[in-house]
Amino acid sequence: MGNTQVQPPEAAFCDLDRNRGLPLVQLYVMPSFFLAVMILGLPLNLLSLWVFCRRMQRWTRSTVFLFNLTLADTSWLLALPYLINYHLDQLYWRLGLPFCMIVRSFYHNYFYLSIFFVTCISVDRYLAIVHPLRSLVLLGRRQTRLLCVVIWAAALLLSIPVATMSKIETCPGSNRTVCPLYIFLSHTEESLPYSLICSIFGFLFPLLSICYCGLRTVMELHSRPDPHHKKRRVRRVLSTTLVFFALFYLPYHMSRNAAILMRVVYPNSPTSWGRADMAFSLEMCLCSIITCINPLFSCFMGRQFRKEFHGTFGVMFFLCPGTQVASIISKRTRMTVRKSQGVSVVTPVCAPVEPVS
């Protein structure tokens, strides 16, 4: 605790009055959401990683991007117990300043990893349809892997200022230390320009790229015959991606910037920050649901992954014949698993062996 800064702390994290909205969100809503997300999202993402590493024999560019998206989800979920413990422990940070910097940077880093990889998937679909020959040069296997490395490095660099702005503070009259996110700090000289830059380059530009790629892709397909209903599938992919941004990332960035702007407009009135802080805290809960949705997004985007994921999921239930879920698995699902043998064989581990006559 030698690095703890004893100074006037942020009142919202030291005053845990249950009659106020923000403490209720911080002490009860956030840990409940995070715990539910971890319980649901971690098995789904670990299963997705297993499918990627063990069942996928043919990797396309989209497969590489979806794998990195799942890897980012899993990494964030593995770090989530520290935040859950912090909120359940009455906002008492016991791990020191270095770990506070790491956890806060990692939380901030994850959302931009997710945005960048979803954007790459949209750009990949655009290049494959509008510029099929050029896409082989622009996004070959080597270029795709290099792009993923660049995205991880860029997201890491983008989160370094979060570490420099993070600090733990000791509440007056007690020995409790808190580790607030930089958005909730009263000093806005660094946090406001940094948040705006992240919003522009980490969210607005990717959103415009997705809109442009989707529009050009639909226009290109509109001029072609469509015997396999490809236009309908592309529209669904575009709509799903835009819904992701509309439901999660747009309110997240708007509420984050609003929370900081309230501190700029009313620098000496902490009570004026309350509603904006509570809105952003709720958005943090909402955005955590993305880690549970991304495995389903991978199934929606990748046909081969969807087949292997469903097959693996079906085999897991076949191994538990006594369950109610196993009894309602249809014959069609079994046929789908058998048909996938041309790509990769799905065989129950505990299948009975017939005696040799």
Image: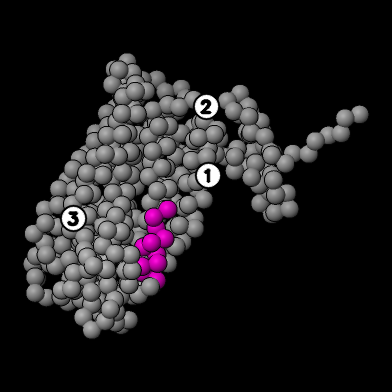
Q: Which residues are magenta?
A: 78-88
Q: Which residue is mark 1?
A: 47
Which numbered tag is attached to residue 57?
2
Residue in view at x 43 percent, y 32 percent: 63
Separation of disc 1 and disc 3 at Cα? 35 Å
From the viewer's perspective, is residue 41 above or below residue 150?
Answer: below
Q: Position of residue 309 (x, y in %)?
A: 54, 39
From the viewer's perspective, is residue 21 above or below residue 289?
Answer: below
Q: Residues within 10 Å of mark 1 (few under 14, many from 20)?
A: some
Q: Which residue is mark 3?
A: 164
Residue in view at x 45 percent, y 27 percent: 59
Which of the 4 quarters of the picture holds residue 209?
top left
Q: Position of residue 106 (x, y in %)?
A: 31, 52
Q: Position of residue 3 (x, y in %)?
A: 22, 65
User: Which residue reaches farthest front?
Assistant: 2
Q: Amino acid at mark 2?
A: Gln
Residue 48 visible at all: yes
Q: Nearer the viewer, residue 309 or 143?
A: 143
User: Which residue reaches farthest top?
Assistant: 133
